[in-house]
């Protein structure tokens, strides 16, 4: 058995000619292997039984020699892929999974039945160029450049990938090489394997953005340190997924999901503060704040799109106010273009941030200069930590939302940060509690959060009107104020009902 430890990058044709030179700059010695034309087929049953177990079965033929490969469920931490892999030679392009040792399979797996029902799902065909390098520290790293295509159900998707795999030596050298390659610009860290992409193509299930942040899946018996790893890794993957979704189909809501993922990681640092001391995350937080600043126009852009949507109640009012419609159109033209966003996601700074977060997780960066208090805190049961965190958030909310007080628009607008933090704590730790009880308690607060978001929309538009100082916009300003008042009344009803609900963590 081999365990792959590799980083994957996506690159365009512009970067391909530059790769050999970058490798030569970094390596002490370089061995250039002959290029190979690899023909691969991926197999599964009609019910996708292997896929359900996160097992990949592939045959690969090159120069009339074939082998079969099993990749078992592994671990992806940020951009770092680690999966157990087994290889056996075969005489034909069809696999024989019964030839693998019985002990590699998950318990209870029906090997014979699966073997009888295997058929090819998709193929990947590409030219592979390989370099074996040795670093100054004596580590050996294989660098692989694949150019070709995935073919499934008559559909084709391009393969243009660079993979670097640690063969022998220090993992830190793998990250150093990755940083060196990223400095070129034009490379992106890749989250999805060829197999994952092939299955999506074969089953006609394109990658789609999430509607919500979702809840991190935690083991109820996990320690605080284990929960930290799960939360940060979830956030990194959430960012990478929606970065790819943006390349597939650009949209403002997809960019908002990238922002959500970064905010979840930042919140995890704060949530696990007893074991994540400030100096351990200072640089990472600075870079995440840089990225959020690069995307701070997105929510305003979503507001503007909302106003000009024919399906929205604002449309007729806006459309009838020529001055405001013109202003909104002007603001929309000032937004970054799709090309600008693609350049951001290809930039060295953005990709070095994702790589640094990945390395921080893999190397357990929070353990540097740990105090005895942090060591003890790391071993605390996460359930105990979660209850204390939720109680703290709940007390803060109750102090800002006293039961006997009527809240106005400004009260709710000033509440957003506090409510977002409380909800993010639930995203990080809520899976430790009963799902139905959790959802019943959170739903009204999520509704209030969306209400605050809509209030911000109304407030933003009202500000735009006021800045023009035109008599013809006074009617729209009045209409916006009434809309806000009506919305606050609905939010007040949700708030009063929620304050009397029993918290799900108690």
Image: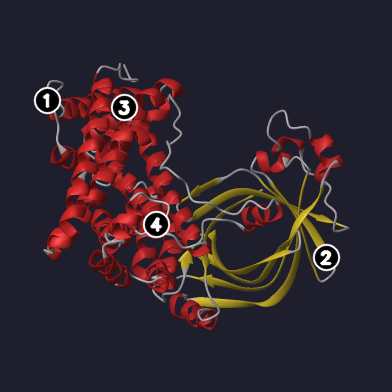
Looking at the rendered image, the disc whose residue lies closer to the viewer, 1 or 2, is 1
Q: Which residue is mark 2?
A: 65
Q: Nearer the viewer, mark 2 or mark 3?
A: 3
Q: Residues within 10 Å of mark 1 (few under 14, many from 20)?
A: few
Residue 126, quarter of the rendered image: bottom right
Instruction: Identify residue for label 4.
Output: 309
Which mark is first along the chain, 3 or 2?
A: 2
Which numbered disc, 1 or 3, marks the residue that appears first in the sequence? 3
Rounded to the nearest angstrom, the CA distance separating label 2 from label 3 is 55 Å
Q: Report the disc number at residue 90.
A: none
Q: Residues within 10 Å of mark 2 (few under 14, many from 20)?
A: few
Where's the C terminus, which quadrant?
top left
Q: Earlier in the sequence, mark 4 or mark 2?
A: 2
Residue for badge 1 = 405
Is residue 38 found left or right of 440 in the rendered image? right
Res 386 label = 3
Residue 424 position, x and y percent, is 32, 38
Q: Quadrant of residue 496?
A: top left
Residue drawn where x is 27% and y is 70% of the image:
326
Please state the horizontal and vertical placement of residue 399, each as a whole percent of the image.
13, 27
Is 500 placed left or right of 228 in the picture?
A: left
Residues 134 and 320: in front is 320
Sequence-wise, the earlier of marks 1 and 2 is: 2
């Amino acid at each position: 058995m081999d365990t792959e430890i590799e980083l994957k990058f996506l690159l365009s044709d512009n970067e391909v000619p530059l790769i050999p030179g970058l490798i030569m700059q970094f390596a002490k010695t370089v061995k250039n292997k002959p290029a190979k034309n690899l023909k691969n087929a991926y197999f599964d049953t009609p019910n996708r039984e292997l896929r359900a177990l996160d097992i990949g079965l592939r045959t690969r033929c090159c120069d009339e020699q074939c082998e079969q490969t099993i990749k078992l469920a592994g671990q992806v931490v940020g951009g770092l892929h680690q999966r157990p892999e087994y290889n056996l030679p075969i005489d034909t392009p069809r696999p024989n999974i019964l030839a693998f040792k019985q002990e590699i399979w998950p318990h209870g797996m029906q090997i014979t039945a699966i073997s009888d029902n295997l058929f090819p799902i998709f193929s990947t065909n590409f030219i592979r160029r390989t370099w074996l390098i040795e670093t100054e520290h004596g580590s050996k790293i294989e660098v692989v450049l694949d150019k070709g295509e995935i073919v499934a159900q008559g559909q084709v998707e391009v393969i243009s990938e660079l993979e670097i795999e640690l063969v022998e030596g220090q993992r830190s050298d793998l990250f150093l090489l990755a940083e060196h390659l990223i400095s070129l610009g034009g490379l992106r860290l890749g989250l999805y394997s060829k197999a994952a992409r092939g299955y999506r193509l074969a089953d006609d299930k394109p990658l789609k953005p999430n509607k919500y942040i979702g809840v991190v899946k935690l083991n109820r018996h996990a320690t605080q340190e284990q929960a930290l790893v799960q939360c940060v890794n979830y956030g990194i993957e959430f960012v990478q997924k929606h970065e790819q979704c943006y390349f597939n189909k650009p949209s403002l809501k997809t960019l908002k999901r990238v922002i959500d993922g970064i905010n979840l990681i930042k919140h995890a640092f704060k949530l696990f503060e007893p074991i994540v001391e400030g100096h351990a995350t200072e640089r990472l937080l600075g870079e995440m704040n840089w990225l959020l600043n690069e995307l701070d126009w997105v929510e305003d852009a979503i507001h503007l799109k909302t106003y000009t949507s024919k399906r929205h109640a604002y449309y007729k009012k806006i459309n009838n106010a020529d001055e405001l419609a013109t202003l909104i159109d002007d603001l929309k033209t000032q937004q970054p273009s799709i090309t600008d966003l693609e350049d951001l996601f290809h930039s060295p700074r953005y990709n070095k941030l994702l790589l640094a977060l990945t390395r921080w997780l893999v190397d357990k960066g929070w353990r540097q200069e740990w105090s005895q208090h942090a060591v003890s805190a790391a071993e605390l049961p996460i359930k105990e930590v979660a209850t204390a965190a939720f109680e703290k958030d709940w007390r803060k909310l109750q102090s800002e939302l006293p039961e006997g007080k009527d809240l106005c628009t400004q009260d709710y607008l000033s509440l957003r940060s506090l409510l977002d933090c409380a909800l993010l704590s639930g995203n990080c730790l809520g899976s430790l509690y009963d799902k139905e009880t959790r959802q019943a308690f959170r739903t009204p607060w999520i509704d209030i959060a969306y209400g605050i978001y809509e209030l911000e929309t109304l407030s933003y538009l009202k500000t735009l009107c006021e800045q023009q100082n035109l008599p013809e916009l006074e009617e729209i300003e009045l209409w916006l104020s009434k809309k806000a008042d009506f919305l606050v009344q609905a939010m007040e009803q949700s708030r009063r009902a929620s304050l009397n609900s029993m918290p799900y963590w108690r």
